[in-house]
Image (cartoon, helix red, strand yellow):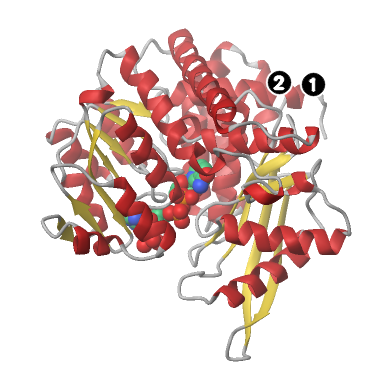
Amino acid sequence: MQTTLVNNHVSAYLDEIYDSVVKRDPNEVEFHQAVAAFLQSILPLLEKEPHYIEKGILKQIVEPERVITFRVTWVDDNGETQVNRGYRVQFNSAIGPFKGGLRFHPTVNQSIVKFLGFEQTFKNALTGQPIGGGKGGSDFDPKGKSDMEIMRFCQSYMTELAKHIGPDVDIPAGDIGVGAREIGYMFGQYKRIRGAYEAGVLTGKGQEYGGSLARKEATGYGTIYFLNEMLKDNKIPLNRSTVIVSGSGNVSIYAMEKAIEFGAKVVACSDSSGYIYNEKGIDIETVKQIKEIEKGRIQDYLKKYPETTYKEDCSGIWSVPCDVALPCATQNELDEESAKQLVKNGVKAVAEGANMPSTPEAIEVFLKNNILFGPAKATNAGGVAVSQLEMAQNSMRLKWSFEEVDEKLQEIMKNIYKNCRSSVDEFYNATNLIQGANIASFKKVADAMIAQGVI
Ligand code: NDP
């Protein structure tokens, strides 16, 4: 691991921690990447407050409390038995029950769910709500599956997962490949197994059975609320900005919608096959129709707007000139070359809607060039924040209006920005918010762990 103060004893200690993580699970590269970036950024805090090292907190914080893997067997429409692997990583419950999404995608493995669970722990702490961190999923690929196959898979997955979760234990939600439909099937199966209506066991539920208004919009909207705070602080008007957004899934769609509502012009978005560009601006209602209702490809946008450019190279989106870039698709989608291209084209701000979408080299390019940078665990925390509001509504057995939830979301995102900003001011006096997010969240989790003793 590269740290800035190589001869410093704190730095040497961090290297030791990092090496032990790599030694324990040598193949988990995404997890190593997340841990390395995190440890580097909290170095100034540890120099100032060495008791975190003396209490052995770092050794504990990089090791999940529990990792569960299991077989998920189901029968496809041809009557053939299929086998997938299911995961749930219960990373840290110092400040509340484990909470984090489920991802169904062929790339899911233990490294991916561990990195996501690790990041989730600190993201959840940043929201100021009492929720610990977890993540899960499966290497199941929902693409091309029939509705009945999805249902059978979800039921089988939940049959095992139900043994490990509960409204006060671990509360999963959606992520890539897991939307309202999948949450519905899993909730139904959980209810059947438990014989009780424990509404607070999953979030992202449908409106008819305990879901919160504004949950669907929360991650994308929250990203824009955070972005707006960051831009305002630096006197850059969002309403005169040109924006590009990677992906066209849940986070991307609602980030685009809110950016447009703020008066920005969104000129490009993508899916895993390619990207579209229209200098006059993207029509968000058409994107919603294609991706949410028809479950089609982003290329279908050209049927209605044939003058739009489509290129079969999703990373090509980063060559589109813009003021603001929002990576909202997946991890490591924005690399060093793409970052250089964005900088060359005059990008002023980057805010991460997806989890760890920028590679460490790309972040380095942004920071060196003084580009405003909103890190994922702060920028995209709006989703989990509203999930927690869904849990609160379930406990109270009442339902808030869209406006009430949205107002709370805006307040939470403003506070996250403020907390990150003040940690940066205290420790760095710099413009980047990565350290701010990591230090503020680490302190919260670590203090709770110390208070609870060595467990
Ligand atoms: P979805 O499955 O709804 O959407 C993902 C989108 O990204 C799809 O449009 C997909 O295209 C596209 N995509 C995948 N890989 C690439 C790529 N390499 N280049 C361009 N596009 C790509 O997922 P979400 O929107 O829910 O999640 C997106 C990210 O946000 C993930 O990192 C997730 O962990 C994170 N996140 C999500 C939250 C939520 O509330 N949903 C909360 C916090 C973080 P295709 O249709 O072709 O697969």
Left or right of 195, for residue 124: left
At mark 2, the secondary structure is: helix
**Which mark is on residue 447?**
2
Examine the rendered structure and indicate whether residue 288 appears above or below residue 169.
Answer: below
Q: Amino acid at mark 2?
A: Asp
Q: Which residue is mark 1?
A: 451
Q: Position of residue 212 (x, y in %)?
A: 63, 40
Q: Kindly identify the amino acid type of the residue bearing the numbered disc 1.
A: Ala
Quarter of the image that includes the N terminus: top left
Closer-to-camera residue (146/446): 146
Residue 343 horizontal/vertical position (percent): 18, 33
Residue situated in front as seen by the camera: 18 or 303: 303
How many numbered marks appear?
Answer: 2
Q: Residue at x 14, y 39 (%)?
A: 321
Q: Which percent across, then down, holds residue 135?
A: 62, 49
Q: Are marks 2 and 1 in contact (CB under 8 Å)?
A: yes
Front residue of this view, candidates 36 and 118:
118
User: How far across and how far down the image is residue 317, in percent?
Assistant: 22, 49
Confirm or reject: label 1 Cβ below 8 Å from ligand 1: no
Residue at 41 percent across and 13 percent down: it is 428
Q: Residue furthest right?
A: 195
